Image (tube, rainbow, N blue to C red):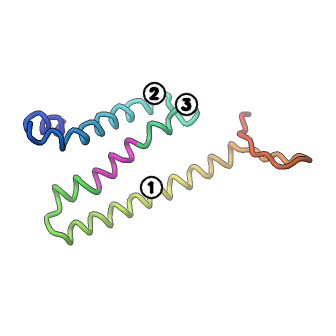
Amino acid sequence: MALATRWWRAPDERSAWLPHLLLWAFTLACLARIPLKAGAFHYGFYLLPAPLVACGVLWFDYLPRFLATTPAARRVFACTAASVFIMFSFTHYRASKTLYDQHTLLLDTPRGRLCCVNTM
């Protein structure tokens, strides 16, 4: 809402804030759609990149811009953001690996190996 207000009230800055407004509108639409049965077996993975980009913009652009006034504080925000993304990536990898191992089936045949999705 703040971005829409800023975009509306500052006509000279509209071209600068329009990508941010579109990103957050699309992100909110994606986040609203994911709980409505858009899982990994549907098209849930296609809805996830926009919220991840929005999270990166929040951590690397908005928070340093509005909260950090010194270069040292900006570096602290950048290190914190990088740590959060590394933690999220590691957690996602751990959870995905466990699920991927549960849903795959390795078939050894006389002609070679085949890795299939286990649907049972």
Q: Residue at x 22, y 66 (%)?
A: 74
Q: Residue at x 32, y 67 (%)?
A: 79
Residue at the right extreme of this rendering: 110
* Mark 2, secondary structure of its residue: loop
CB under 8 Å between discs 3 and 1: no
10 Å neighbourhood of mark 3: few (<14), some, or many (≥20)?
few
CB under 8 Å between discs 2 and 1: no
10 Å neighbourhood of mark 1: few (<14), some, or many (≥20)?
few
Judge from the rendering whether residue 120 lies leftward or rightward of residue 84; answer left or right: right
Q: Which residue is mark 3?
A: 42
* Mark 3, secondary structure of its residue: loop
CA–CA distance in space, label 2 to label 1: 23 Å
Q: State the mark number for residue 88.
A: 1
* Mark 1, secondary structure of its residue: helix
Q: Which residue is mark 2?
A: 36
In-front residue for pair 18/101: 18
Residue at the bottom extreme of this rendering: 72
Q: Which residues are magenta?
A: 50-59
Q: Residue at x 32, y 46 (%)?
A: 54
Verify whether residue 51 appears in magenta.
Answer: yes
Verify whether residue 8 appears in magenta.
Answer: no
10 Å neighbourhood of mark 2: few (<14), some, or many (≥20)?
few
Judge from the rendering whether residue 113 lies leftward or rightward of residue 16; answer left or right: right
Q: Quadrant of residue 66?
A: bottom left
Residue type at the position of mark 3: His
